[in-house]
DNA sequence: ACATGGTGTGAGACCGGTATCATTAGCTTT
DNA sequence: AAAGCTAATGATACCGGTCTCACACCATGT
């Protein structure tokens, strides 16, 4: 087409015009209700009623419109429909990392549940960065999503989510809870689960237990608890410290190892754990990526579980069932997290205006084979 | 206005009117360009030019509009924008199962690449069912997505994808190839990889090698190759049969075990493999779910790898690096699959009209520890 | 003084649906 | 037969943007 325009500028040749017309007709996109109406020789309003399935229409009108519609291959345009109704059948989902089975399982739960309610989902990755999360919320709101399901990166910075709420877009948080935010939240038993694990370990004689997590801080040290953005991480560390203190361990903060953000970092954490004095006899891994890495490090160093070291990981990932012995895990049924989150969102979309609620999904300890008696001396 | 009519019909009470009116003003959704224009005391066209970042506007106009915009908290409506431009910033992705790391990794690759081009993605799960895939394509086209990335469930039934193409929506297939479809495809080296694995095994003395895959057929038997819907499965089985035949194995079809669709089914396949005569000395698992299940079955039966049995799985999943020995795998870098797919789609969206092409991503054999000499007798 | 040209602006059509209202046709009611 | 009612239909405003076009304005050139 641009070519033709150029031709017109150069000379007065008339041929190009004709070609233009034919190109126009060629690029005629999909037929609209108006086209169908014309074909069926009824008004646009009648065609729209039949095709949209609203209002009333006679059987004869219905027949003639439907015939015209599939003669033309009519496909409704949901964009236009959303615009005129104000409703959009899309739900925005923001997770830290879809590649992580923890989240991809949750997404599957969300997807299956939304589908049943005729909703689709737009997925976004925050990479656990607040700035990206803020950006994606904005993008999703511009798309006028019907609702949002978010795993908020920082429970203290939720203004972007608040804004969504006041604009009338329901929000449900998943895996994490932001008390400031008047939104439903679906969480695991973060505090309880760590208590359960520690009780079990202490029953087996463990005193010095390490907790390994991915959190980063400026100085690499565990600072004030209130400064931890991800609520699930904060709750578990708080539970860890509290429980260890109650058990009479002196400086429990020294046993919370943070910064296991990647493979190399986790390796160095494991080294520090093995060199720790007094000796550490059990390791808790806050997610399955860290768990897998810790397990490999321990095996590589020739340690056998649970004789030389006990290990408990969070999340029942595939890998934790193929090792020998199988790994003891805190089972976080994230598919259910997703299901519940989607259910709550749907309820909100259907007008449920009850006060926001925190739903806690049970996360039991599956003790398989990596909790043994504490190695003494 | 409508309110008055209703009120008049019911009674002469004026209160309802007020209430309705307040509700009206309350439900006033986010401000529009028209609102901003009014606030800035310019025309709608000028406000639109400034806010939409197109056309020309004087600095003074720009300033006054921007000020009005953030005084009102203006948020553009991408729905409306898409409708009037015809472009939508959404790409539809249809995979078999997001919960599967194979696909979730690919989705991450797609997501990261699309993001850089300012596109978002709508995810759908086909559950490897053609009917669902057809339905989702239709839903996505109704949403007027800019393009589609699909792992087609059945390479022989792609009319719904063809329809998308003729309607002008570019399509890229991932992991699978449908020759009938004039679309770019991103695949692994299905045929080559199985040849490579078999050569390696045959070099180690293996003759009777089993290939285990998830495909279902009506009678549970491997029928004609042309009847296999998923191209990657077909290619690999074809490669398997061909290579085995060349190596002088009599009825290679007896060594292709299909129907490993779930845990129980895989267990029964393993039983049949272990009871097979002549004895089978190596197992190939067509994906990581099957691989993990086969591995567990073998361990549970007290077999040790690779002494009693050799094992090669497709896809380098987390679990295959934590077993001892580590599993030899055909590495399918699905993140790259996704990246490449997104790149091709973006190219198409930018007008690339070159003939569709098949891109083959190298899928090398990572021989770690589960290929040993064939157990004799 | 008058044609030329470029810049900035406003009016309004348009995208493809939904939703409101007026109108007509067909039928009952008294 | 006139009035009343409902079912079916058509005309048209509207959602919130984009985009075309006409026009007003001011600076040049001759």
Image: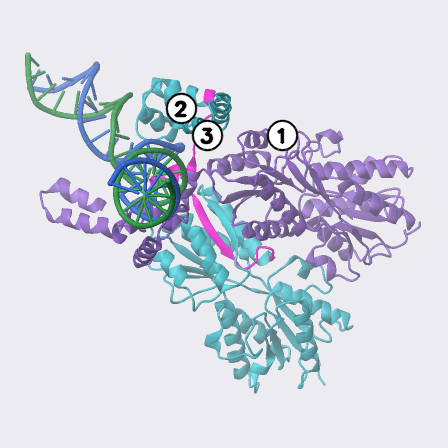
Chain colours: A purple, B cyan, C green, D blue
Tell me if residue A145 is in the magenta stretch: no
> From which residue to which does the magenta span run?
B71-100
Q: Is mark 2 on a helix, strand or loop?
A: helix
Q: What element carries label 3?
A: loop
Q: Nearest to the eye among marks 1 and 3: give it.
A: 3
Q: Nearest to the eye among marks 2 and 1: give it.
A: 2
Q: Mark 1 points at which residue?
A: A157
Q: Residue at x 63, y 79 (%)?
A: B206
Q: Sort mark 3 into few (<14), some (14-19) or many (20+) by Cα contacts within 10 Å.
A: some
Q: Sort mark 2 into few (<14), some (14-19) or many (20+) by Cα contacts within 10 Å.
A: some
Q: Residue at x 64, y 31 (%)?
A: A181
Subunit of mark 3? B
Please tell me which residue lies in front, B294 or A17. Answer: A17
Quarter location, residue A232: top right
Q: Are marks 2 and 1 in contact (CB under 8 Å)?
A: no
Q: Nearest to the eye among marks 3 and 2: give it.
A: 2
Q: Name the residue under label 3.
A: B75
Q: Which residue is drawn at 25% across and 50% down?
A: A38
Residue A220, above or below B106: above
Give the Cα distance between marks 3 and 2. 11 Å
Give the Cα distance between marks 2 and 1. 30 Å
* Residue D19 % position (x, y): 28, 35
Disc nearer the start of the sequence (3/2)? 2
Quarter location, residue A80: top left
* Residue A331 % position (x, y): 74, 52
Tell me if residue B82 is in the magenta stretch: yes
Q: Name the residue under label 2.
A: B35
* Residue B3 % position (x, y): 44, 28
Q: Is residue B361 visible?
A: no
Subunit of mark 1? A
Q: Is residue A344 visible?
A: yes
């Amino acid at each position: 087409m641009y070519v033709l325009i150029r031709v017109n500028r150069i000379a007065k040749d008339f041929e190009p015009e004709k070609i233009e017309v034919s190109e126009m007709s060629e690029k005629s996109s999909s037929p609209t209700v108006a086209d169908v109406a014309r074909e069926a020789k009824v008004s646009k309003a009648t065609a729209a009623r039949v095709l949209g399935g609203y209002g009333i229409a006679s059987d004869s009108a219905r027949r003639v419109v439907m015939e015209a519609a599939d003669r033309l291959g009519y496909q409704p345009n949901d964009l236009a429909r959303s615009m005129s109704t104000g409703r959009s059948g899309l739900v925005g989902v923001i997770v830290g990392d879809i590649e992580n089975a923890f989240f991809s399982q949750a997404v599957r739960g969300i997807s299956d549940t939304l589908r049943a309610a005729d909703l689709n989902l737009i997925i976004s990755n925050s990479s656990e960065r607040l700035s990206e999360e803020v950006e994606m919320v904005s993008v999703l709101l511009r798309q006028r999503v019907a609702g949002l399901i978010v795993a908020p990166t920082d429970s203290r910075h939720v203004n972007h989510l608040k804004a969504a709420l006041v604009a009338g877009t329901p929000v449900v948080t998943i895996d994490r809870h932001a008390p400031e935010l008047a939104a439903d939240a679906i969480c695991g038993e973060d505090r309880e689960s760590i208590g359960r694990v520690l009780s079990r370990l202490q029953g087996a004689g463990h005193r010095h237990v390490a907790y390994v997590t991915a959190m980063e801080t400026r100085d690499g040290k565990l600072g004030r608890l209130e400064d931890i953005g991800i609520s699930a991480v904060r709750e578990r560390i708080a539970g860890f410290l509290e429980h260890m203190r109650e058990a009479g361990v002196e400086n429990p903060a020294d046993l919370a190892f943070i910064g296991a953000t990647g493979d190399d970092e986790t390796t160095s954490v494991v080294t520090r754990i093995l060199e720790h004095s007094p000796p550490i006899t059990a390791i808790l891994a806050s997610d399955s990526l860290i768990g897998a890495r810790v397990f490999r490090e321990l095996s590589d160093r020739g340690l056998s579980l649970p004789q030389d070291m006990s290990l408990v990981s969070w999340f029942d990932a595939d890998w934790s069932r193929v090792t020998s012995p199988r790994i003891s895990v805190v089972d976080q049924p994230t598919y259910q997290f997703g299901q519940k989150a989607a259910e709550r969102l749907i309820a909100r979309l259907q007008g449920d205006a009850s006060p926001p609620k925190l739903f806690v999904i049970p996360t039991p300890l599956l003790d398989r084979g990596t909790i043994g008696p504490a190695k003494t001396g």
